[in-house]
Amino acid sequence: MHPLLEKAQKIKQQLNWSLIFGVSFFLIVVIGLIQITAGVSHWLVENKDAQIKHLTVQGHPKYTDETAIIKAIKRADLSSFFELDVKHVQQLVQDLPWVATVSVRKQWPDTLQVYVVEHDAVAHWNSDLLLNQKGEAFQASSDKLNVDLPQLFGPEGSEQEAWLAFKQFDEMLKVNALTLNSLALSERFSWQLWLDNGVRLNLGRKDKAKRVQRFIDVYPRMEHPENAQIDTIDLRYDTGLAVSFKPMQEEQLQNKSKA
């Protein structure tokens, strides 16, 4: 046989084997996928009626009863494990007063896990709301709180600014062993502070931190009339301040005489 013909025949044989191998592998893959798909479909049909039978609440909520969380979850349709909308469950739980964030996860075959994080209240806001550490307002009953929180007041939308200012001023006032009890921001963004000793600071609208510092520098040297105490300190001046006094209460006078 001519060498060229012999070489061509060998190449043809190799090509045929490659083609046969490739087609065979493709058919095996297709058959495997069909079997897997059929198996999954059969499994889904068999388990289409799987229900949520167990609820697990995690996160150790302090102010929200577990029974209230479970009651909120049961407002969702728990009849189908696969069709349950976890986002809907998440929203139902997050609508509870003290709940800040919620994570919901389905665990096969019949369990729903709910992780709850509550707000950490740091202040009252406009008497009827609370503020969390981020300066976000939320509606919840303060009856469950076991500590007295500072009172903050201000226009809607100024929550974060008021809370940041409160923390700044309270830290500054600690130099004179004073504590900030309350803060108010008017509609015209004028600031007022109330200290734990009953003194009110009127800061005005600008340079509020510098004016608090002026009070801190002057306060230890302030003198006041006999049987009187400082009522208000007006710091709305480029330099200096104005002080008004009020009579001491009877209880304060008695304590003073005993001392």
Image (tube, helix red, strand yellow):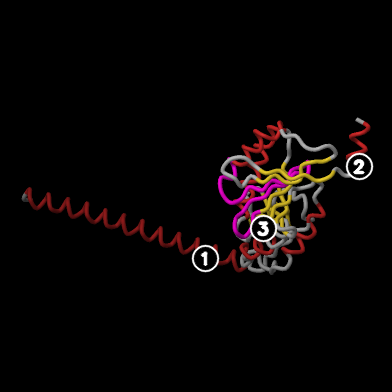
Q: Residues at badges 3 and 1 in contact (C-beta under 8 Å)? A: no
Residue picked out by circle 1: 38
Q: Per the image, is 194 magenta?
A: yes
Rendered location of residue 33, percent (x, y) = 45, 61
What residue type is disc 1 on?
Ala
Residue 182 % position (x, y): 72, 48
Residue 37 part of the magenta segment: no
Position of 77 relative to 210 (above/below): below
* Residue hosting label 2: 251
Name which residue lies at 85% across and 39% down. 227
The disc, 3 or 2, on the residue closer to the chain's N-terminal end is 3
Residue under label 3, please give it: 109
Residue at the spot 67% in from the left edge and 44% down from the top edge: 242
The numbered disc on residue 48 is none
Label 1: element kind: helix
Q: Report x, y in % for residue 57.
A: 73, 53
Q: Measure the C-alpha gap from mark 3 to mark 1.
A: 21 Å
Q: Residues within 10 Å of mark 1 (few under 14, many from 20)?
A: few
Magenta residues, start to end: 185-210
Residue 41 seen in the current view: yes
* Residue type beneath disc 2: Glu
